[in-house]
Image (cartoon, rainbow, N blue to C red):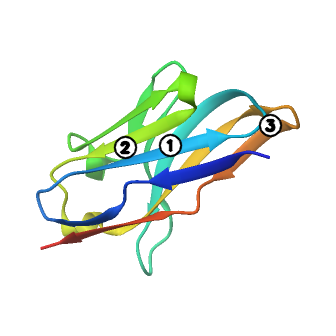
Amino acid sequence: QVHLVESGGGLVQAGGSLRLSCAASGRILSINTMGWYRQAPGNQRELVATITAGGVTNYADSVKGRFAISRDNAKNTVYLQMDSLKPEDTAVYYCYTRGLSISGIFNSWGQGTQVTVSS
């Protein structure tokens, strides 16, 4: 079983920055995609950004130019640097990974971390 631990959420004023981290642990053989999704109250969960093992990134249009996703493959960790935050970025942010463990292919989600941006 693959376990994800997220950190870095919190309360910040509009225009501020936060950095989220997510570390994967378990009997992992390889990780393909790592990413971040978010869910605001009353909304569906939506993609924020993803990154492949080779470093190919994908961003939601709403965060392009403000957020940057990166990963440390040696540590099985993905990061999300969030700059120029807006109140509409307020949501619970979930880490996601997909890869191969000794048990087979896995798709794992973190428990979520709250990000609140005040105006």
Quarter occupied by residue 66: top left
Left or right: 69 with respect to 17?
Answer: right
Please tell me which of labels 3 and 2 falls first in the chain. 2
Q: Are the two marked residues, 3 and 2, in contact with CB atoms closer than 8 angstroms?
A: no
Marks 2 and 1, how far apart in space?
9 Å
Q: Quadrant of the C terminus?
A: bottom left
Query: Which residue lies under the disc numbered 1?
Result: 35
Vertical side of 19 occupied by 105: above or below: above
Disc 3 secondary structure class? strand
Please tell me which of labels 2 and 1 falls first in the chain. 1
Vertical side of 32 occupied by 119: above or below: below
Q: Residue furthest top?
A: 54
Marks 3 and 2, how far apart in space?
24 Å
Q: Which mark is residue 105?
A: 3
Left or right: 35 with respect to 59?
Answer: right
Amino acid under disc 1: Gly
Q: Which mark is residue 80?
A: 2
Q: Nearer the viewer, residue 42 or 77?
A: 77
